[in-house]
Amino acid sequence: MKLRHPMQTDTNQTPLHTIDLIRKKRDGLALDPREIGFLVSGAASGSIPIEQLSAWLMAAWLRGLSQDETRALTLAMRDSGEKFDSSRLGKTAVDKHSTGGVGDKTSFLVAPIAAACGLAVPMISGRALGHTGGTLDKLESIPGYRTALTLQEFETVLAHCGASIVSQTPALVPADRVLYALRDRTATVESPGLICASILSKKLAAGLDALVLDVKTGSGAFLRTQEDAEYLAALMVATAEAAGTRTVALLTDMGQPLGRMAGNFIELVESVELLRNQRPPESEDLRELSLILSGWMIHLGGAAPTPEIGRQFAEAALEDGSALAVFFKMIEAQGGDTSVFDSPAAFHKPGATQVLNAWQSGYISEMDTTAIGWAVQRTGAGRERAGEPVDPQAGILFHARRGARVEAGWPIATLYATTEAMLPEPIELLREAITISATPLDFVPLVSRIFTRENAEAHLGNAVR
């Protein structure tokens, strides 16, 4: 007689119990869609205690989620609350999402660029998670900017501006609001299945027609190995495509902060500089990646026959000022005061400032970007616990980046902290995170691989997990 795990059943009528599902996942067995739906419903309604959800997350992190479990979790979370109907906008709805990075501010560029090219960009974003910054925290450094819009307000801004960047409403993907916060507090962030479901549930609930994913690799990525990043990228593409959304994933370098600023308000300053068609050399990687991502958005949205031509359209939107006009229009529509960008230095008043100088001559050959992310967080720009306030003025400005030649005593970074007492820790973290060597580093490509619906399923079929 074939033995079954005590949690396995032949009927869908058997009552479900959370402790049984924790045990089943702990023992390495896969949950079916009904069981996953039960957990998601309990997270959304509050009927499952936090400690049990935390235990299940840890079991899922340790044992992993199968592709079928990931898809079931994604769809159950998407359907756990209200969904946005983008069809009323009369435009193709396209979005971009990054798996999280230090200094990653591409949303502030790609959203207005794509909108300026005739697409609708309904962008539902998150807050700081782990060592990475949060898009919403950055936008809320603009006086008056509202991220918590109702779905009706969201639609109104989109119809008026073409783009809107908001937080989840209480009714939109409520299960993810609970699980997202728990993952940050239970060390269960770095799971391909959980990352995929969290990202895609929000994106699919926004009624997207197409989605471009920016999957980070390198020392600042949540998934540190190339193999794990490739698996996550392929998994998200296959999962979103199965749900009916055209999707592409680009693996991009996070071996150093993106651009030259990491924090909250200062990241917006850098973004507006580029939208004004200024080109500081230390921001060139940010500009280039934003154009590549925008090109794919424009292509998948049907406004360009190829991503390369889409990139040309994106660059034109930067150069003619139309993307900047969309961005400022969106900020004002959501209550923000764009006058702070007239003279950013007058508005940016950090509590304490200190310059870190090079301690020897040579080349910056390596940057531990995760450690740098924690340094940014320790200035006051991030949070240690969900719900904590962040300092909009805090962050780090990098004067020299990977590959740069520096002399002893030259400035490497300027730190902006909430108080003087908060400066020593991030200073020490930066000193440990930055390696100065006698020889320059090898070239690292900005984009290392691209997954589309044509190659994602094949990669998953060959992946060893």
Image: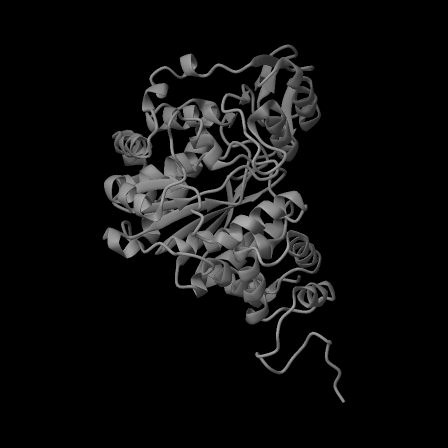
Quarter holding residue 165: top left
**Residue nearest the observer in this picture, 298 or 334:** 334
**Residue nearest the observer in this picture, 306 or 261:** 261
Labels in figure, total: 0
**Furthest residue in direction top, as rendered:** 409
With respect to residue 257, does 124 lie above or below? below
- The chosen color scheme is one colour
With respect to residue 351, does 193 lie above or below? below
Q: Is residue 336 visible?
A: yes
Q: Residue at image x 55%, y 14%?
A: 351
Q: Residue at image x 64%, y 31%?
A: 374
**Residue nearest the observer in this picture, 401 or 82:** 82
Q: Quadrant of the C terminus?
A: bottom right
Q: Quadrant of the N terminus?
A: bottom right
Q: Is residue 46 left or right of residue 22?
A: left
Q: Is residue 234 visible?
A: no
Q: Residue at image x 26%, y 39%?
A: 161
With respect to residue 205, does 150 lie above or below? above
Give coordinates of residue 276: x percent, y percent: 32, 25
Give coordinates of residue 65: x percent, y percent: 62, 62
Q: Is residue 194 left or right of residue 82?
A: right
Give coordinates of residue 156: x percent, y percent: 27, 44
Quarter holding residue 47: bottom right
Give coordinates of residue 425: x percent, y percent: 69, 22
**Residue nearest the observer in this picture, 268 or 136:** 136
**Furthest residue in direction bottom, as rendered:** 1
